[in-house]
Amino acid sequence: MKILDRPDNMRILVFIIISCIAAFSSNAQNSFSFLNIANNARINALGGVNVSLIDTDVNLFTSNPALLDSSQQGQLGINFSPYLASSKFISLNYAPNFKNGTWGVALQNLNYGTFQGTDAVGNVTNDFTANDFSLGLTHARKINHISFGITAKLVGSLLESYSSVAFLTDWGGTFTHPKHDLSFGIVAKNVGFVLKSYGNIRPEIPFDLQIGASFKPKYMPVRFSLTAHHLYAFDIAYNDPSINYTFDNQGNKIAKNISITDKILRHFTVGTTILIHRNVNLFLGYHHLRRKELLAASLGGAAGLSFGAMLRNKQYNISISRATFASGNGQTSFSFLWNFRKK
């Protein structure tokens, strides 16, 4: 029987299409931007975005809820990144060993540190802190070669005595080829609404629509991933005329146009996993938008590139990665996975 002949699979495909339609109707962006940070070392090393990598790694379902699988039950993932300046990014991902379905819990926190407070005229007051957080609950289901999942999460931002809260959802699906090492993923991320605003300032939600594929050629110890992001808009390029300019015949500055090819490429990230051993993997990634937005003009550099490594056995999994932003800045991530499930 063909896959699409089953009524259950048809309902799943309809579910995914409806999710995409709902996603395209959203045009909010930019606030709660910490949700766009890769929350584990593996995704960070593969370019920062991946929705199709199917593996027994509980940290993956935060990228696409459909990546949550029963093989991840009993796993706890702990991730830490000493982020920009003195900020620290921490995440915990856990899949309880339930018999009545596949569930996952995810907690993310970006701590910006402690700041010295002052009043309107500059007098020193009390210290204050700033934090962003997300608490999510995920449920996934698999029928034959198709999986789908949904995450409901409470997202908040705390700054001194001010706060903003939103209720968001992620809707995802995956398809695994029955014969080849090939998988596809799609996810509509951060679909929801704001519950509480910073006073009269209503934050916008960082919605994204992502589609990707992962493929391992037969007999090659390499797995490739290609992921497209920000598919709700074609032109996502930031063209700063003060940097990206040329001169006309009279010597006047004029802004350079960004080519159609460059605009298309800014939607893609590429990730490569080198399978040295089933318990030893190396990772390489490239994020074209990040390179174009963060590369220092005329200085070159490694902005947009990322790399990492992973060691694992039946009970433990240790990963480390580095994604380069600009001028030596970047995100270093450490991940530790512990499998509590008895073998």
Image: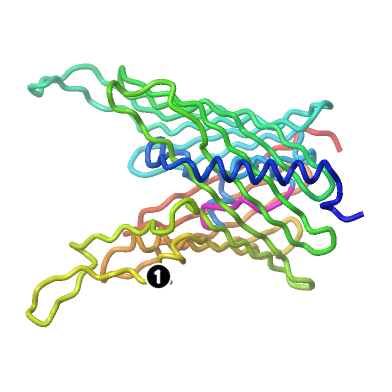
Q: Which colour assignment does the render follow?
A: rainbow
Identity of the residue drawn at 70% across and 64% down: 215
Q: Is residue 245 left or right of residue 335?
A: left
Q: What's the amino acid at mark 1?
A: Ile
Residue 236 % position (x, y): 39, 56
Residue 333 % position (x, y): 51, 47
Span colored in magenta = 47-55
Identity of the residue drawn at 53% across and 60% down: 307
- In which quadrant of the rendered view does residue 253 lie? bottom left
Secondary structure character of the magenta stretch overall: loop
Q: Report helix, strand or loop for mark 1.
A: helix
Residue 106 % position (x, y): 60, 31
- In which quadrant of the rendered view does residue 94 lie? top right
Identity of the residue drawn at 47% across and 44% down: 37
To which residue does mark 1 refer?
A: 260
Q: Is residue 246 left or right of residue 316?
A: left
Counting labels gives 1
